[in-house]
Amino acid sequence: MKKAAELATMCGVKTCVVVYGEGEAEPKVFPSHDKAVVILNEYKSMPDLGRCKKTMDQEAFLTKRIAKLHDKVDKARRECQDSEIRYLLYNIMHGNHPGLVDLSVEELARVGWKVEELLKSLGERMAKIQVQAPPPAPCISTGSMDMGSPSYYLASPQHQDGYLNMVSSGGDVGTQVYGGNASHDGAGFSGGDMMM
């Protein structure tokens, strides 16, 4: 009765409730017997289409409620199985089931199905990213920059042999002074400026 009063107040609609208690001769009526009779007469005078639109009896209500609960149970079961498969796959990837010999045929089938599903999903995402990604911008040079040649390449063959002998004898190339280009235009290091 209280819920009917709340519904009438919150939604601004006319409500009435008639409840026949077990073993009682007179029903309990909300809001009052006279008002309930008026509301029920209005309801009965409505055309069948409007009256039956959302009408349901106790059996129809319970059937609909049970179907919703079955859907919830099925969804929870699928989520639980998916979590179990993911956990099993995680353990397999971390070497907890070497050779997969301790898995049942059902577990192997479920893991195989999950791997195929994940690979398919990854393939679809990669294809989507490739379609959406803009092509790389071309590298455009605004001018030629002459960095010059390192002095190693300009060195005489005897000088080059000295570098090679030092490296082959276990010397540290990083301690050598970089000669760079002998010419200096102020934009970089001059010969002997940089120590590795």
Image (tube, rainbow, N blue to C red):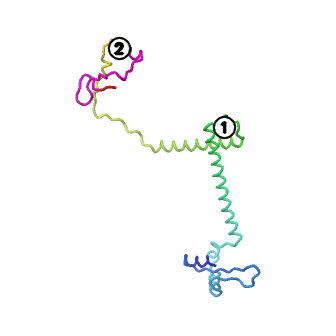
Q: Which residue is mark 1?
A: 97
Q: Measuring from the top left, give residue 123's x and y in whole percent.
A: 55, 41
Q: Residues within 10 Å of mark 2 (few under 14, many from 20)?
A: few
Q: Residues within 10 Å of mark 1 (few under 14, many from 20)?
A: some
The residue lying furthest to the left in this view is: 185
Q: Based on the displayed image, in which of its 4 quarters is residue 140 positioned?
A: top left
Is 188 part of what is drawn in magenta? yes
Q: Is residue 55 left or right of residue 168?
A: right
Q: Based on the displayed image, in which of its 4 quarters is residue 59 positioned?
A: bottom right
SS state under label 2: helix
What quarter of the picture does the N terminus occupy?
Answer: bottom right
Q: Is residue 107 left or right of residue 181?
A: right
Please report the bounds of the magenta region as a residue range: 166-193
The residue lying furthest to the top in this view is: 158
Residue 140, relative to residue 182: is it above or below? below
Towards the viewer: 94 or 181? 94
What quarter of the picture does the C terminus occupy?
Answer: top left
Total label count? 2
Q: Measuring from the top left, give residue 49's x and y in whole percent.
A: 63, 74
SS state under label 1: loop
Q: Which mark is residue 134?
A: none
Kind of residue sitting beneath label 1? His
Q: Measuring from the top left, give residue 107's x and y in whole percent.
A: 69, 43
Q: Residue at x 69, y 68 (%)?
A: 62
User: Majority secondary structure of the magenta segment?
Assistant: loop
Q: Is residue 141 left or right of residue 114?
A: left
Q: Which residue is mark 2?
A: 162
Towards the viewer: 169 or 103? 169
Q: Measuring from the top left, give residue 153's x and y in whole percent.
A: 32, 18
Kind of residue sitting beneath label 2? Gly
Q: Pointer 1 and pointer 2: residues touching (CB < 8 Å)?
A: no
Of mark 1 and mark 2, the one earlier in the sequence is: 1
